[in-house]
Image (cartoon, grey):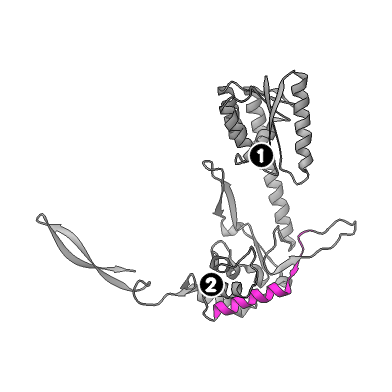
Amino acid sequence: MRVATYARYSSDLQTEASIDDQVRLCQRLASQNGWLIGQTYSDAAISGASILRPGYQRLLADARQRCFEVVVAESLDRISRDQEHIAAFYKQMTFNGISVVTVAEGEISDLHIGLKGTMSSLFLKDLAQKTRRGLEGRVRNGKSAGGITYGYSVLRSLNADGTPVTGERQIHAAEADVVRRIFRDYSNGQSPRAIATALNSEGIAGPRGPWGSSTIYGNGERGTGILNNELYIGRMVWNRQRFLKDPLTGRRVARMNAEADWVVEEVPALRIVEEALWKAVKARQGVTRYGRPLRHGKGSPGTRRSVMVYGTSAGQNVPFTCSLAS
C-alpha cells in the first residue's frame, strides 16, 4: 500500500526539527506495516486551526487523484485542530478509499473524529482564553501586549533571576520626532497624502515600508493609523476589537468590541504628543474626511442640489425636479 505522511508544527516552542521527528515516527510505523513510503507533506509554523496550509492543500489535491491509499500522521491534531475541518478531512479520505492512521491513535474511525475533534476544539478555546488572560495582565501592568508601535523600541532588561523582561517599551527619539511632525503638519492643514509624499521623498522609512495616507489617517473607530493611536498621548488601549474566523474563507475578520470591554491604562512615560496638539488634530478630524475639509459647495455635506427625474402621468414620461441633500 502506498503511504503519504503529513507533519505540522505551530508552537513557538517547536522548530523545523519537529517536522523531521514527526516524519521519522510516521515512516517507522509505515515500515512496520510493510507499506510503501511515498510523498511527505508538511507545514511549518502554521496553526492547525487553519486549512489554508500549502502542504495540507497539496495532500487533499493528491488524495482526490488517489495517489496513495493511507495517510499517516503523528496524531490527529497534527492534521487539524478544528472539529469541522477534521471531520471534513476524514469524509474526503473515506470517499476516496483512503485510510487515516496515526502513531498516537492507530487507525482513525468515526469515534476518533467525534472525541478527538471535540478535545482539540476545547484545547484551542482554552489556549485562547489563557492567552487573552496573560495579555490583559500585561496591559494592566502598563506593558505591551505584543508588536512594536512606530515611535517606540523594545526596552531590553533582565529580571532578578536572569530571565528577559517582556513587554517593556521606550520612546525611539528619531521616530518620535516623525510622529510629532505628522501631527503638526496635519493640524496645520496638510493632507495625509501630502504628508506621506513628503516623508517618502525625504527617505524616511515608515512602519512597514513606504508611507501611505492610510498609514497616517487610519480608522478612527478602530484606533488605527498614526493620528488615532492613543499611545502617543500616554494611553494604552487594548481589546478594542476581536477577530473571528470566517467559516467560508477561513480568514480572520475584525469585529469591534463594546467600549465597556476595552482595557485602558495610562502610561505617561510613553507620551510623545502633547495634549493640545492631539486635541487640535481631533478637532480637524471632526470636520474633515480623509484629510479634506468639508466645504459648503457642490457635493459637500450640508448643501442641496436639484436633479431632473422622470415620472409617469397619463402614460407619459413627465420631467420634474427635486432637491436632494448631499
- On screen, residue 259 versus residue 312, left or right, reads right
Q: Check disc 1 and report its element: helix, strand or loop.
A: loop
**Please, what is the three-letter code of the amino acid marked with disc 2?**
Pro
- On screen, residue 186 versus residue 131, left or right, reads left
**Residue 133 locus on image (x, y percent):** 71, 51
- Of 127 and 226, nearer the camera is 226
Q: Residue at x 57, y 30 (%)?
A: 88
Predominant secondary structure in magenta?
helix
- Residue 271: in sight, yes or no? no
Q: Which residues are magenta?
A: 166-187
The quarter of the rendered structure image containing the N terminus is top right
Instruction: Quadrant for residue 219, please give it.
Output: bottom right
**Please, what is the three-letter code of the amino acid marked with disc 1?**
Gly
Q: Which residue, given by chain and number where applicable, does mark 1 sit on?
A: 48
- Of 189 and 256, nearer the camera is 189
Q: Specify whether residue 183 is painted magenta.
A: yes
The quarter of the rendered structure image containing the C terminus is bottom left
Q: Residues within 10 Å of mark 1 (few under 14, many from 20)?
A: many
State whether residue 22 is above or below residue 251: above
Residue furthest left in the image? 314
Q: Which residue, given by chain and number where applicable, does mark 2 sit on?
A: 192
Q: Check disc 2 and report its element: helix, strand or loop.
A: helix
Q: Residue at x 66, y 39 (%)?
A: 48
Q: Residue at x 53, y 43 (%)?
A: 249
**Residue 143 locus on image (x, y percent):** 74, 62
**Residue 16 locus on image (x, y percent):** 76, 42
- Residue 255: in sight, yes or no? yes
Q: Specify whether residue 113 is painted magenta.
A: no
Mark 2 vs 1, N-terminal side: 1
**Residue 212 locus on image (x, y percent):** 56, 67
